[in-house]
Image (cartoon, rainbow, N blue to C red):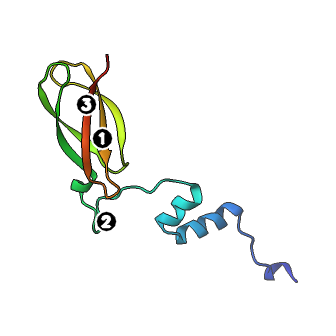
Amino acid sequence: MPRSMKRPRSSPAAAMASRLAKADDRTIDELYGLEPVYEPDLPGATAAEATEFISVLCPYCWESFETRVDLTGGTFTYVEDCQVCCQPIELTCEVSDAGELRAIKPDRMD
């Protein structure tokens, strides 16, 4: 075959870019082993479902304060300082499979 009739070869990077340009977000997440991203602009997803403000009673000073919790990851435990007395509080948040807050338990860290 004459040289002028040969097809130019594309680089492996160009071939990969071409395949990825046709893939949707879910396919790319699966390809690279990424967790799905919460996208509040999608139909059926509201910001109210993702986070919720809760009232917490500090187990040290017994004052109440509000904090926001993220409900997208399921049941979790984390440490947050009291907004009044600055003592560390371990908050255990129980979240249902549907993403609803079932219970919250504040514990002292001492």
Question: Residue 16: x, y in percent?
Answer: 64, 64
Q: Amino acid at mark 2?
A: Leu
Q: Amino acid at mark 1?
A: Cys
Q: Residue at x 30, y 54 (%)?
A: 99
Question: Residue 20: x, y in percent?
Answer: 56, 66
Residue marked by disc 1: 93
Q: Determine whether, in the image, residue 49 is placed left or right of residue 8.
A: left
Q: Nearer the viewer, mark 1 or mark 2?
A: 1
Asked if disc 1 and disc 2 are in contact, CB closer than 8 Å, the reply is: no
N-term mark: 1 or 2: 2
Residue marked by disc 2: 42
Circle 2 Cα neighbour tier, 10 Å, few/some/many (<14 / 14–19 / ≥20): few
Q: Determine whether, in the image, residue 12 is placed left or right of residue 32.
A: right
Disc 1, SS = strand
N-term mark: 1 or 3: 1
Disc 3, SS = strand
Q: Nearer the viewer, mark 3 or mark 2?
A: 3
Question: Residue 48: x, y in percent?
Answer: 21, 54
Circle 1 Cα neighbour tier, 10 Å, few/some/many (<14 / 14–19 / ≥20): many
CA separation in Å, label 1 and label 3: 9 Å
- Residue at the right extreme? 1
Which of the numbered marks, if any, corresponds to residue 16?
none
Q: Residue at x 51, y 59 (%)?
A: 29
- Residue at the left extreme? 63
Q: Quadrant of residue 79?
A: top left
Circle 3 Cα neighbour tier, 10 Å, few/some/many (<14 / 14–19 / ≥20): some
CA separation in Å, label 3 and label 2: 33 Å
Residue marked by disc 3: 106
Disc 2, SS = loop
Is 29 above or below relative to 54? below
Q: Amino acid at mark 3?
A: Pro
Q: Quadrant of residue 38?
A: bottom left
